Amino acid sequence: VRAQTDVEKGALVVPQRALIDLQGRKQVAVVVPPENKVEIRNVEIGPTWGNVTVVRKGVSAGEQVVIEGIQKARAGTVVAPKPAPPELAGAEPADAPAATPAAASKAGT
């Protein structure tokens, strides 16, 4: 049973698969334009809902995070970013019932 206890309007969310766990700290690999170089950033996370986690600090709306090939992502590596298919980006299938509450709105994805 899940109950909504808090609302984070305009929350930025990332797919859980984008999170790197390093000795208890959470990090994400961010693609920085215009060179498309990877930058590893520490992030402060919030609640998780389904396949997405709220990121409170460390990533801004509109930034691209690495969700596939993350094991190879190293700071300074040049990558060729591509949009992720919805199922990898944490989206629910089109025929699934809506399960994302306002606390995890996809403002940044």
Image (cartoon, rainbow, N blue to C red):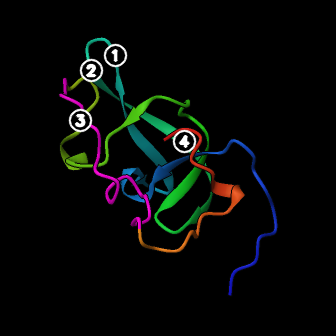
Q: Real-space Cα distance between discs 2 and 3? A: 11 Å
Which one is in front, 13 or 86? 86
Q: Residue at position x 70%, y 57% from top?
A: 103
Q: Residue at position x 19%, y 47% from top?
A: 69
Q: Compared to 74, does 36 lie above or below?
A: above
Label annotation for residue 36: 2
Closer to viewer: mark 2 or mark 4: 2
Determine the secondary structure under disc 1: loop
| Residue beneath disc 4 | 43
98 on left or right of 65:
right
Q: Which tag, 2 or 3, sits closer to the chain's start?
A: 2
Which one is in front, 69 or 108? 108
| Amino acid bearing label 4 | Val
3 on left or right of 105:
right
Closer to viewer: mark 2 or mark 3: 3
Q: Real-space Cα distance between discs 4 and 3? A: 22 Å
Which one is in front, 72 or 94? 94
Image quarter of the N terminus: bottom right
Determine the secondary structure under disc 4: strand
Q: Which tag, 4 or 3, sits closer to the chain's start?
A: 4
| Residue beneath disc 3 | 82
| Amino acid bearing label 3 | Lys
Closer to viewer: mark 4 or mark 1: 1
Q: Which tag, 2 or 4, sits closer to the chain's start?
A: 2
Q: Real-space Cα distance between discs 4 and 1? A: 19 Å
Q: Are marks 2 and 3 in contact (CB under 8 Å)?
A: no
The local crowd at label 2, few if under 14, some if 14 to 19, many if 20 or more residues have their Cα within 10 Å, is some
Q: Which residues are magenta?
A: 78-94
| Residue beneath disc 1 | 33
Q: Residue at position x 31%, y 56% from top?
A: 88
